[in-house]
Amino acid sequence: MTKAKHKSKANLKSKEVRQRLKPQGEPYWMEIDAGLHLGYRKNLDGAVWCVRARAKGKYIKRTIGDTDDHHPADGEIVLSFTQARHAAETFHQAAQAVETPSARRTGYTVTDAVTDYLDWFKLNRKSHESTEQICKRHILDQLGSTPVNSLTTPQIDHWVRNMAQTPPRTPLGKPKPPFAIKTFTGKYTKPKGHKIYSYKKLPYKQWTPEMQRKRKSSVNRILTVLKAALNFAWRNDHTANKDAWSRVKPFENADAPRIAHLSQKQAQDLLKACSDDFRLMARAALMTGCRYGELCNLLVDDFKGDHIHIRISKTGKMRDIPLSDAGIRFFNSLTEGKGRNDFLLTHKDDGEWGRSHQTRPMLEACKKAEIEPTISFHILRHTYATLLLETKKGKPGMSIRDVAALLGDTVATCEKHYGHVIQDALKKEVVRKLPSFEGIN
């Protein structure tokens, strides 16, 4: 069975572990603070300690001494791990001390602000990769070279409005349908024979209101990242004023409308239309309300008999999700023939479910089940929450607070997403219980 993979960096503290590392040109880096890394560079002749420190708006690399792998540390030429770490921290402090506050404010650019923010973000938040991609694709090319102290409100406002009228692009730089017209060129790739398409941008005037809303919503999220990076720079005394970006407001009414969800029948039709291995993944989502990433990380040991324990979540908080009787039977069947550290949900060939692996099977299942428009896998989470909140046969649903706890969300977030469900339930209760008071003169 496929074993869970635990990502870890080389433990540079241990001589035994260092000796097992293979020689290579690039050092093995270990992050010891924001903007500061201790490195271990090993070649066929020996190994040395290195430091990579951020100062003056860029990274500086230096060799700081030999390792004590084969000779005792003397604190000057041959350094132990502790001594090397202390030397790296001293180097970083000295490099930063060269900069005066006024010099930082003058030459400190948006690229510097974003780099420092991402260093902090990596240590303190979960979604580092996606945030880094947002910065690379949308912020650095347009604003990166601008000194933070020179930013103006009209400049940022122009950048925001220009993005809102520009089609989103794929990682390869092609405009995404439906913001682009996709045309088959009549050619095929070699040797696999895949069709080759051309993409032509759809003029903004031809965008539907929903396309405009979606793009504005995306731009609002990008603006939030920029503001967070610039506020981080302001808090660290790289600029004296934050009015330039604080005055730029996000687009109004750009949030998604009422959250879509499936009815019970639609959910059953979708499960029937799924391939065998993907059906297990989709059913697990409907029975737990878990995000796709949370389901991918579930181990056999996370099934506790009557509930599922979520160790790894988007918010970084663990939680327990009670199971129905059917849910207990379902998850119990997934554990058969597996060890406690095996993944609960795997492909039919025992392979791991990875990032975006759910997209194509979900699209195929929606088409086969005739669900229009097609939905994303995340809608199964919304379906779980909605079915719990809805009034059924005159009986009120669960409280929004309880559903928030099950989802691992805040009450405010759930009220934003599912407030309409609660209002619909209250309306039914008022109609059912309140007397008419008619016939009284």
Image (spheres, rainbow, N blue to C red):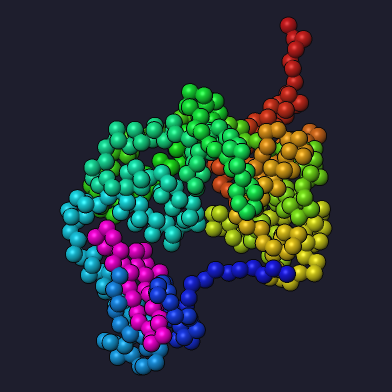
Instruction: Indicate whether 347 appears above or below 146.
Output: below
Which residue is rendered at x = 50% and y = 84% of the image? 20
Residue 199 spot, x, y in % from top left: 53, 36
Against 39, residue 120 (above or below) is above
Q: Is residue 37 magenta?
A: yes
Q: Position of residue 151 (x, y in %)?
A: 27, 41
Q: Which residue is depicted at the point 81% across and 54% down?
A: 325
Q: Nearer the viewer, residue 207 or 249?
A: 207
Q: Residue furthest top?
A: 441
Left or right, 91 with respect to 434, comes to left
Query: Residue 107, percent across and down?
Result: 21, 52
The residue located at (46%, 83%) in the rendering is 18
Q: Quadrant of residue 355?
A: bottom right
Image x and y of residue 267, in percent: 76, 41
Query: Is residue 396 something that shows in the picture?
Result: no
Quadrant of the image containing the N terminus: bottom right
Q: Residue at x 55, y 28 (%)?
A: 210
Region of the chain picked out in magenta, as a range: 31-60
Instruction: State the residue in front, 188 or 14.
Output: 188
- Magenta stretch: includes residue 113: no
- Name the image quarter holding residue 384: top right
Question: Is residue 127 in view?
Answer: yes
